[in-house]
Image (cartoon, helix red, strand yellow):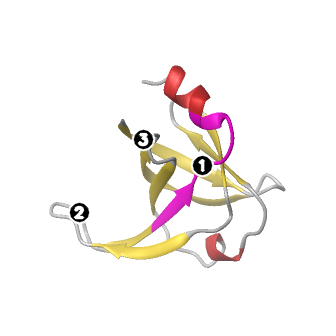
Amino acid sequence: MIVDSFGKLFNASGEIVAEGSCQVDMDRGSVTLRPIVDTPLLSRQTGHLRLELDDGTQLTVRSQIIRFRLNVAGTPPGPAYRLFVVGPEQQRYAGGGA
C-alpha cells in the first residue's frame, strides 16, 4: 500500500531538517521524500529521525538516506530522498492508516 502525504522530518534534538511531499510504501518499509527546499542538513544527520505525516502518524526512520533526482511528468525535476522505516511503527501505520 502506497500513501501520498506531506511530512516533516525531525532529528533527535527536535529540529526540523526537511519537509515536503512523501510517498509512504509500508510494504517495503520505505518513504520517498521530495523536500520543498533541498538543504545539506538532511545528509548530515546521525541516529534515528522522526517523520511526522500530516495525518498525525509518526514514523521512525534510519539516518542512512539515499539521495537521487526525480523527473516526473507534471512536477519540476528535483531531489528526492529514500528513507527507511524502522521498528514497530510500520505495523502501527498500516493498522491505523488512511
For the residue marked with disc 3, what is the amino acid?
Ser
Say which element carries label 2.
loop
Question: Disc 2 vs disc 1: which is toward the camera?
Answer: 1
Q: Counting other residues with Cα less than 10 Å from the Cα at mark 3, is it few (<14), some (14-19), or many (20 or more)?
A: some
* Amino acid type, callout 1: Val
Cα gap from disc 2 to disc 1, whole angstroms = 26 Å
- In the picture of the structure, the residue carrying the numbered disc 3 is 5
Q: Which residue lies under the disc numbered 1? A: 85
Residue 78 drawn at (x, y percent): 35, 73
Instruction: Tell me what residue is drawn at x 49 percent, y 63 percent.
Output: 82
Q: Categorize mark 2 by other alpha carbons within 10 Å: few (<14), some (14-19), many (20+).
A: few
Instruction: Assign the N terminus to one quadrant of the image.
Output: top left
In this picture, is 95 found above or below 71? Answer: above
Q: Which of the two labelled residues, at mark 3 and mark 1, occupies the earlier sequence position?
A: 3
Residue at 70%, 76% in the rendered image:
44
Q: CA distance from mark 3 to mark 1?
A: 15 Å
Relative to residue 16, is residue 69 drawn left or right? left
Q: Position of residue 61 (x, y in %)?
A: 65, 52
Q: Secondary structure at mark 3?
A: strand
In the picture, which quadrant includes the C terminus? top left
Residue carrying label 2: 75
Position of residue 14 measured from the top left corner of the image (x, y, whole percent): 79, 52
Residue 28 or residue 48, whichever sits in front:
28
Is residue 1 within the magenta segment? Answer: no
| Tag 1 secondary structure | loop
